[in-house]
């Protein structure tokens, strides 16, 4: 039946119909692709910003878990990402040690699940119980606060009252208080002076 219909049709009409169908499909795919591209661009447009950010997160007992301060913060929808100018971050690890982070710039991904500190990064805490005061300096560091983990591929200096450790690259396991230099480690030990009091007369 169809063969008879096609035999009766003028070849020019068939070609015209094919071209019309091809044009319709082409337009459909072009518009569909444009919608995908536009939505991807929209994900990366700043949707909000804050001047003088002061964010604090507490547990159910009212204890401070995390705080983020920054001169300016901007947010995009893509991966729920935020960018910070001159961030100051405070977080408490699973051992109850409160760490302070400061840097020139910062970025958080997936809310605050991952934090990246960039430029003159300083991470430190004072002596708490068995955890002696520690200061870490580098130019780039990635933090996964939930997993009590940090990583840097840049030159690192770790300063403690009894030693100065330098190297390239570092992993930090806050849960077990283990800081591992990845390469070119160099440790300088600082002798501790004993407090000897003069004998009483």
Image (cartoon, rainbow, N blue to C red):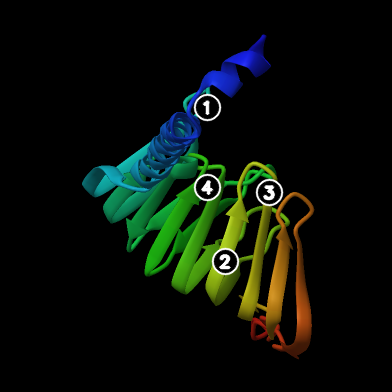
Q: Which residue is mark 1?
A: 59
Which of the image's four quarters has the C terminus? bottom right
Q: Position of residue 102 (x, y in %)?
A: 43, 64
Camera-side residue of 199 and 160: 160
Q: Residue 12: tell me if it is visible.
A: yes
Q: Which residue is mark 3?
A: 148
Q: Is residue 197 above or below residue 125?
A: below
The residue depicted at 64 percent of the width and 70 percent of the height is 152
Q: Which residue is mark 4?
A: 91
Q: Position of residue 6 (x, y in %)?
A: 59, 21
User: Given contact means CB atoms under 8 Å apart, are the residues at marks 4 and 3 in contact?
Assistant: no
The residue depicted at 47 percent of the width and 26 percent of the height is 62
Dot 4: what SS? strand
Nearer to us: label 3 or label 1: 3
Q: Disc 3 to disc 2, how far (Cα)?
A: 13 Å
The quadrant holding residue 135 is bottom right
Farthest top residue in view: 1
Which of the image's four quarters has the N terminus? top right
- Counting residues from the start of the chain, the first of labels 2 and 1 encountered is 1
Relative to residue 38, is residue 115 drawn left or right? right
Q: Which residue is mark 2?
A: 141
- Counting residues from the start of the chain, the first of labels 3 and 1 encountered is 1
């Amino acid at each position: 039946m169809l063969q008879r219909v096609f035999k009766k049709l003028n070849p020019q009409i068939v070609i015209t119909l094919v071209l019309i169908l091809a044009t319709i499909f082409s337009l459909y795919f072009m518009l569909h692709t444009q919608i995908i591209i536009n939505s991807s661009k929209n994900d990366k447009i700043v949707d909000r910003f804050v001047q003088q950010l002061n964010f604090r997160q507490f547990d159910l007992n009212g204890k401070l878990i995390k705080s983020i301060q920054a001169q300016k913060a901007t947010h995009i929808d893509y991966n729920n990402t935020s960018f910070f100018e001159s961030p100051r971050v405070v977080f408490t690890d699973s051992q109850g040690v409160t760490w302070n982070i400061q840097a020139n710039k910062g970025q958080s991904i997936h809310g605050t699940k991952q934090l990246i500190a960039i430029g003159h990064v300083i991470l430190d805490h004072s002596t708490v119980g068995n955890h002696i005061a520690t200061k870490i300096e580098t130019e780039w560091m990635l933090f996964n606060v939930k997993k009590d983990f940090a990583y840097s591929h840049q030159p690192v200096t770790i300063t403690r009252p009894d030693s100065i450790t330098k190297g390239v690259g570092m992993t930090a396991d806050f849960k077990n208080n283990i800081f591992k230099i990845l390469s070119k480690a160099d440790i300088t030990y600082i002798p501790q002076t004993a407090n000897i009091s003069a004998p009483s007369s």
